[in-house]
Image: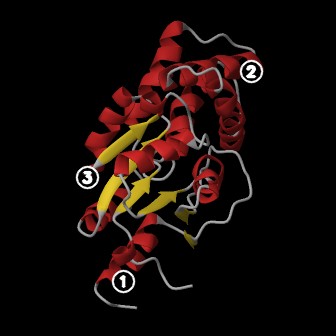
Amino acid sequence: MPNPNAGDYDVLTFDCYGTLIDWGAGIVGHLQPLLLERDAHVIDDFLLEFFAQTEPVVQQDGVAYADVLREVLRRLGDRLAFSPTEAMLDAFAESAGAWEPFRDTVEALARLGDSVDLAIVSNVDNAIFERTAAKLGAEFKHVITAEDVGTYKPDPRMFDAARQALDGARVLHVAQSLYHDIAPAASLGLDTVWIQRGNNAARRVSASPTWTFESLAAFTDAFVGTTAGEN
């Protein structure tokens, strides 16, 4: 299949945490020191899998994402036989806004933003994303968050809200999570790009993205290259 062509789309919508922001490293980097202080020794993959399985269950309660993170840590404590203090719970919730971008994110967004509009469709609170946005260095035409919509991906209402906000624009959705993004977006007829990030804290499901790339940089090279007639 030919590469995705910027001339065929008006807007790139992005998942943020896991696609632009290295949420796996952020989760592990925050939790491992806390666990070691309590003599709880687990491998990184255990933490990522626990997060992947627990986060969607907590989200069904309809609480704010900061409270989702607090509850995930509380349940992790139950699993590993310790009781997180309120300060620990708050610190984990606060940490999300400090998680760092992947190495290729900032440059890729700058290059892509020269060709099409950029938008965010993210499972977080607005306050968390505001802190993250300062790290991304990009102008987003629209930001659709779980707080705005009142639900979490993979609920298709997140993508319906994005399409409504974008008002008929030709949309290509870019994400690393098959569970949260690629499967529901594809089911609604959206073209999708799966970025195969490692260090994943999302549930594993089957999905059929329109295109697959090993990194955001590789996608950007393909997408921007086609804008100059390089097919």
Q: Amino acid at mark 1?
A: Thr
Mark 1 or mark 3, which has the lower sequence index? 3
User: Toward the viewer: 86 or 175?
Assistant: 175
Disc 2 marks which residue?
A: 80
- In terms of sequence position, does the residue under pointer 1 or pointer 2 come before the other? 2
Q: What residue type is disc 2 on?
A: Leu
Q: At which x and y percent is residue 89?
A: 53, 16
Q: How is the image coloured?
A: secondary structure
Q: Is residue 137 left or right of residue 60?
A: left
Q: Amino acid at mark 3?
A: Ala
Which residue occupies 37% across, 30% down? Answer: 126
- For the view shown, which residue lies furthest in the front direction? 168
Label 2 residue SS: helix
Q: Is residue 143 left or right of residue 88?
A: left
Query: Looking at this view, is 82 or 127 the one in front?
Result: 127
Q: Residues within 10 Å of mark 2 (few under 14, many from 20)?
A: some
Q: Looking at the picture, how far across and down is residue 84, in whole percent?
A: 60, 12
70 up-or-down from 103: above or below: above
Of the image marks 3 and 2, the number of the one nearer the N terminus: 2
Horizontal placement of 111 versus 125: left or right?
left
Residue designated by label 1: 226
Nearest to viewer (mark 1 / mark 2): 1
Mark pair 1, 2: CA separation? 50 Å
At 48% from the left edge and 81% from the top edge, which residue is drawn?
3
Instruction: Tell me, for residue 138, which label it has, or none.
Output: 3
Mark 3 neighbour density, 10 Å: few (under 14) some (14–19) many (20 or more): some
**How crowded is the residue under tag 1: few (<14 C-alpha within 10 Å), some, or many (20+)?**
some
Q: Is residue 193 above or below residue 27?
A: below
The residue positioned 53% from the left and 19% from the top of the image is: 67
**Does the image show residue 106?**
no
Q: Separation of disc 3 and disc 2 at Cα?
A: 40 Å
